[in-house]
Amino acid sequence: MGTEIQVRAMYDFDGVADNGELSIRANEILTVTRQDVGDGWWEGRNVQGEVGFFPEAYVETLPSVPQPPAIPARNQNTYSSGGQASSWDSSSYNQQQYQKTAYSSSYSYGQTATDGGGGEQGYNFSNSQDDDGWDEDWDDDTSSNYSDRRASQQDPDELAGEGVFGLSAPNRQQPRKPSSHSQSSAGDAKGSGTIRKSLNRFTVFVKSGGENYMLGSAKATVDPRDRMEVVETSDGIQWGKSPEVFSVEIKNPTKASKLKGMKSFIAYEVTPTHTNRSVTRRYKHFDWLYNRLVEKFSVISIPPLPDKQVTGRYEEEFIQHRMAQLQLWMNRMTRHSIVSRADVFQHFLSCGDDKNTWKAGKRRAERDNLIGGSFFLAIETPSTPLDMQDVEQQLDNFGKFIKSMDDSVKTVYNTAHDSSKKHVGPYKREFQKVGAAFNALSTSFELDNTAKSRPLTEAIAFTGRAYDEIGLLFSEQPKNDLHPFMDALHEYRGIIPTFPDILQVHKGAMGKFRECQKLQEEGKMEASEVEGVQQRLETISYATLAEMNHFHKERISDIKVMMQNYLQQQIAFYQQVTSKLQEALIQYDNV
Amino acid sequence: MGTEIQVRAMYDFDGVADNGELSIRANEILTVTRQDVGDGWWEGRNVQGEVGFFPEAYVETLPSVPQPPAIPARNQNTYSSGGQASSWDSSSYNQQQYQKTAYSSSYSYGQTATDGGGGEQGYNFSNSQDDDGWDEDWDDDTSSNYSDRRASQQDPDELAGEGVFGLSAPNRQQPRKPSSHSQSSAGDAKGSGTIRKSLNRFTVFVKSGGENYMLGSAKATVDPRDRMEVVETSDGIQWGKSPEVFSVEIKNPTKASKLKGMKSFIAYEVTPTHTNRSVTRRYKHFDWLYNRLVEKFSVISIPPLPDKQVTGRYEEEFIQHRMAQLQLWMNRMTRHSIVSRADVFQHFLSCGDDKNTWKAGKRRAERDNLIGGSFFLAIETPSTPLDMQDVEQQLDNFGKFIKSMDDSVKTVYNTAHDSSKKHVGPYKREFQKVGAAFNALSTSFELDNTAKSRPLTEAIAFTGRAYDEIGLLFSEQPKNDLHPFMDALHEYRGIIPTFPDILQVHKGAMGKFRECQKLQEEGKMEASEVEGVQQRLETISYATLAEMNHFHKERISDIKVMMQNYLQQQIAFYQQVTSKLQEALIQYDNV
């Protein structure tokens, strides 16, 4: 009753002051002081404080101010350049940026427009280690021997030193804080901003151990069990098929607590088909696994986990949604013939609830020699030499593809997000407005309460309700089509940013090989040595091409399913609308 | 390119001034100065002239300012009362108000949003006699003997004198000018504002000759051929059926000119089924007929003709639309068993192209004795006396019905008008935005031009086009559903305002009867005389009830058809959308 309504003038109106009318200008904002003036007039106050009558039809009511959407990345370069594509290269593109900006608050479909108080639920990606339960339970043996290796993927300061991303936290509430890993790697990074660009450019390559491997200094005995293949098939270069194909089901999220309820967490039941034995895993175990996979496979795309989310963590909807996202992640990892065979992955899936067995497997995984650059030692490739110029061209095109797909996925995602909001807001309102208009007509016809008049009155009332219900259908529809659609895109928004680093490893290897060729020309390196380098480059190339082809295969299948599901749901929706209208239409048969 | 875009802030945003950001407050209006900033940022200027960046998602673009809708009646009484229904009575409601305000600019569907230059086409009602061709051709014998009779329906000055309607022209561009008739009647109106309210209140009653009739002073010989019946049927009191039922087709609008092309006009071919002979009629002939019918039938609803429209008068679309409206008007008159039998109506329909025959019929019609109050002399009613209290109650309810329907028809009309604009604008844009997003995805996928990738790329491109086409379907749809729907409502917006005057005639008669009863009580009037007055009141009551029932019958049938057509078209539309989506879906079968 007492809330003030704000309206925007849509047209100019020259009021007659003597009639108590207020002159208004198009786009002026007015506060309505009376709506019961009658006959199409309202009374309102302008910003100058003048009060008077104006035609109601000349203004549109403004919605009350809801939660704002995310602020986009604050990027000084982007501000000034005006262009987009040209400024992109693989080093300016990484997971950190992706996680810190695009996702952290924009992934909040539906809720925004409807929730009065609850606000947004941001389903973020996160590698954050600030888990309150992290240093407890099974993880009390804090080993630091792997944190350095991971720094190349994790250190935001180093990225800031590039001067390309002056990112700030999207909702401005949490200033970006360096992760524990960036600190542990500060020693070799010599502080932020001091690393020379040329060095920095090969960071991923050098840090992942790619350089060591190329120069032949990575040594490890490879157990035949650990051998991984790249094969040439009619479909091109592919990862060798896994001898055992299985899938994993994640279900029954259970809220549990320890320390007398001071700490609570969700335990999931994880069941792989090949063991058919359920194990219990928490988010932190997934996170541990994720980090092992990232450090082990420098040319395999390991998409980030869904965010841990601090607020509303145990709300049913959130838990279900995160479980669905964990399931998608697990499916993707299971489908990868190399990842799914990895010891650490199998340990995660099959280790029972015995603490010591877990710890043994954990320690073994963390001491794995075949990680990063050394992983290539375990790869067997076809003996056919590759045309290196062709390989470079292919990977260059792939880089462009990834960049372009990143843009278009963002566009589609944002469009879907907008559309989702419009379904919940304006579309619903519009159809309900039509419903209300029919309802008004029916109500006025009620004044002729004769037997001849009543059937029409009732048919119109039915039509009014039908449009009202169609409005509701609109607001419910995103759950059926746009949200699953966005979930699928969301996965790709996590996958895409893993590729620039993968391509960077290859680029680094390529550069190293050329360096060695030059040294040979200058007589500073033996031909046999260079040949070894070349062979190792071929291994990296084969692996990278296999991963590229794996990506495309997955993409085609995923996007196909996403589009089909979306269109099927859209069709079902419009059929439902049509039925509602048909129901309304037959009401007129007995008028 | 150089046009400024105005946006409204939907949320508060605290900009960081050092980043060149602009702080904005919800509902603030900004002018966009750059949209190519990138990454979700725009640059804009606030009203204080400050310029800076803000998130694009925080604002909504305002439409450019279209032609405003009509200004509602400026009614001082309504302003101050706050109530609606209570302040309404038949004297504050009339055709003049209706024609001068509600319609003249609001009836402009569709065009507004799409037309860049052409602007709105206002299809107005008009009784304007300022036809450049009016005083020529067949109408050179300017007779003034009927203009006085019509003054009661025509004189805006007199209405202004009531102090109720301080109307101004809706778009304020054309100050209201008195029609030629208001001048010719100035003599008996004694100038504006000087008529006393009590007298004025019975204006319609007195001027139409109702008072004369009630007092028995209207005398005329009624040819048996001219007798009209009111009958009591199982459906209630009705106008007697016409012995001859026919329909009329209006077609072949032909542009003709005279005075060496100085004057041009449209000639329509008018063909009634009962003569099956086509005659040629111009708008001015319709207008002449309209005025004859209005003066003759004081208790029959004669809806106004479509407006003559001065600008763009010969544009194909306008001509077709006006012809369609004339056809609707003609159908309605033809369906009325009393109107369709009238000599003047038959003369209009059947008189050939001979100038003298036309003139003779014209003169006859203009000298018709059975017009206005005298028309009641021609009416034969059932002999059953009516319960006057019941009649009064019925007509009172009918007045309320008419008022309520007027409001709800306006609501539905405005909703339809809004919805029509939304189809052409935002809905189209939204679907095309979705189409463009899919198109962007497909374009990025083109970068993987392999046989495996291509089918998906093409299916997505197809989907993009499908959504684009659905956008077009949305913008085309109002022509199929909302425009005919609005045309039907438009007719009622013309019919409804004819009733308050009709009810006023009955009220006047009722008052006169009570006056006579009082005179009888005071011994100033003979019982036999009062009995005559009562009988005449019964005749008026029967006629008014017959017209009321006729209205309801027409209303139920018209609105039923309107709703059915609308729903059928809506169903067809959503089925079309569904087909488009189904076409898109099958593209994925061979991916």
Image (tube, coloured by chain):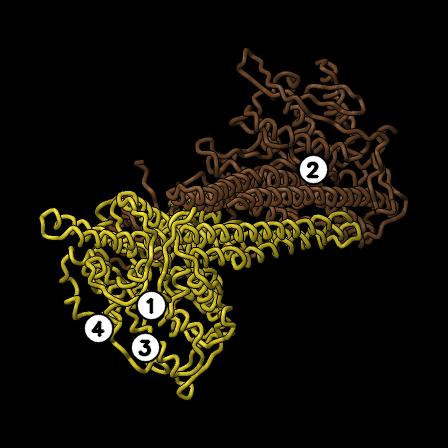
Chain colours: A brown, B yellow
Tag 2 secondary structure: helix
Q: CA distance from mark 3 to mark 2?
A: 107 Å
Q: CA distance from mark 1 to mark 4?
A: 32 Å
Q: Which residue is mark 2?
A: A207
Residue A403 in view in this figure:
no
For image coordinates 63% across by 40% down, the residue present is: A490
Q: Which residue is mark 3?
A: B363
Mark 1 and mark 3 on one chain: yes
Q: Nearer the viewer, residue A153 or A452?
A: A452
Q: Which residue is mark 1?
A: B223
Disc assigned to residue B184: 4
Mark 3 and mark 2 on one chain: no
Instruction: Answer with mark 1 or mark 4, whichever residue precedes in sequence.
Output: 4
Q: Nearer the viewer, residue A442 or B502?
A: B502
| Residue type, mark 3 in image | Arg
Instruction: Answer with mark 4 or mark 3, whichever residue precedes in sequence.
Output: 4
Mark 2 and mark 4 on one chain: no
CB contact under 8 Å: marks 1 and 4? no
- Count residues near mark 4 (Cα–Cα under 10 Å), then give few for <14, some for 14-19, many for 20+: some
Instruction: Answer with mark 1 or mark 3, whichever residue precedes in sequence.
Output: 1
| Residue type, mark 4 in image | Ser
- Count residues near mark 1 (Cα–Cα under 10 Å), then give few for <14, some for 14-19, many for 20+: few
